[in-house]
Image: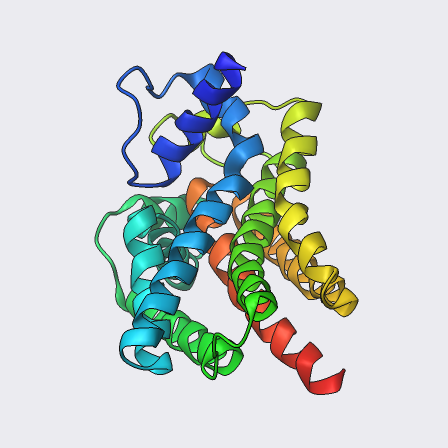
């Protein structure tokens, strides 16, 4: 149990800005195993975003509440995944060879592709969330739980989809220059089972309210499949930035898929 807590806190320290015990470090062995708890980080981020949304919605308005919830999720993770998305936009937008793409993605400066990409991504996410919960009212306990599960499921499922690329593809870089490389070295069945278990639990609970919600897995994993194939084609695998970009895109696809489901059911 003590070891599992250490692994969990390693994941928490690596993927968020939340303070962790002083004995937690970037031990490569624990970082490899921390991938099993990546979707659990989604539980935390989703719960924080939901709490901020409810508070600001009560005090001000739904639209501002949605925006503040997005800000909260970015602050909790330190824009970890948004930064990866921007780097992927710059790298694949400006590079035409594997070496050039990887070089651009490693550059800390953001370019036109990255800036435009992040702005459009956040605008789409805002509009999607506003469509989903912009009319949210605390009518009863069930509606509160349902909305909370929407937030948490979006973050956990998208992280599950992103980390699954580690289980099926090779790391692209040949050196140790990426801060995400340690988690990509190896994995066991525990990481695979843990990632899928923790990734699916919130959605399965949500399906108890509306069973059709399980259908959102299809577009999310279809998106994951095409992104992974695209990365494989151009850079022979993935990088940490690719995982961050996959998480962001899959989160957006989750929201859009729920909107489509609500429209036709």
**Residue beneath the point at 57% across and 61% down:** 145
Where residue 197 appears, x then y in whole percent?
68, 39
**Residue beneath the point at 45% across and 24% down:** 31
Where residue 69 appears, x then y in whole percent?
35, 65
144 is higher (above) or lower (below) than 224: below
Q: Left or right of 233: which side holds 240?
A: left
Can you say which quadrant of the picture contains the C terminus? Answer: bottom right
228 is higher (above) or lower (below) than 250: above
13 is higher (above) or lower (below) than 152: above
**Residue beneath the point at 35% across and 49% down:** 105
Where residue 146 appears, x then y in whole percent?
59, 65
Does residue 171 show up? no
Q: Left or right of 255: which side holds 220?
A: right
Q: Quadrant of residue 50?
A: bottom left
Q: Quadrant of residue 55?
A: bottom left
Q: Total of numbered circles in the picture?
A: 0
Name the residue nearer the viewer: 254 or 40: 40
Q: Quadrant of residue 121?
A: bottom left
* Residue reaching furthest to the left: 109
Does residue 159 show up? yes
Name the residue nearer the viewer: 120 or 100: 120
76 is higher (above) or lower (below) than 85: above
- Colour mode? rainbow
Where residue 160 appears, x then y in whole percent?
60, 46
**Residue beneath the point at 78% across and 65% down:** 211
Name the residue nearer the viewer: 113 or 10: 10
Can you say which quadrant of the picture contains the N terminus? Answer: top right
């Amino acid at each position: 149990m003590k070891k599992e807590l250490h692994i969990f806190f390693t994941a928490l320290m690596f993927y968020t800005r939340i303070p962790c015990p002083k004995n937690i470090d970037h031990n490569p062995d624990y970082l490899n195993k921390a991938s099993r708890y990546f979707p659990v980080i989604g539980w935390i981020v989703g719960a924080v975003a939901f709490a901020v949304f409810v508070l600001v919605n009560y005090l001000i308005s739904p639209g501002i509440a949605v925006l503040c919830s997005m800000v909260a999720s970015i602050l909790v993770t330190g824009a970890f995944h948004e930064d990866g998305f921007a780097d992927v936009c710059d790298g694949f937008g400006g590079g035409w060879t594997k070496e050039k793409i990887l070089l651009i993605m490693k550059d800390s400066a953001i370019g036109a592709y990255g800036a435009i990409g992040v702005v459009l991504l956040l605008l789409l996410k805002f509009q999607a969330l506003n469509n989903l919960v912009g009319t949210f009212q605390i009518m009863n306990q069930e509606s509160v739980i349902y909305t909370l599960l929407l937030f948490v499921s979006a973050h956990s499922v998208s992280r599950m989809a992103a980390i699954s690329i580690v289980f099926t593809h090779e790391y692209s870089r040949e050196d140790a220059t990426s801060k995400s490389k340690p988690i990509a070295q190896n994995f066991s069945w525990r990481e695979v089972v843990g990632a899928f278990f923790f990734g699916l639990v919130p959605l399965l609970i949500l399906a108890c309210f509306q069973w059709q919600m399980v259908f959102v897995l299809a577009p999310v994993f279809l998106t994951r499949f095409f992104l992974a194939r695209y990365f494989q084609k151009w850079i022979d695998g993935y990088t940490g930035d690719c995982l961050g970009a996959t998480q962001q895109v899959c989160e957006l696809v989750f929201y859009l898929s729920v909107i489509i489901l609500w429209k036709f059911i």
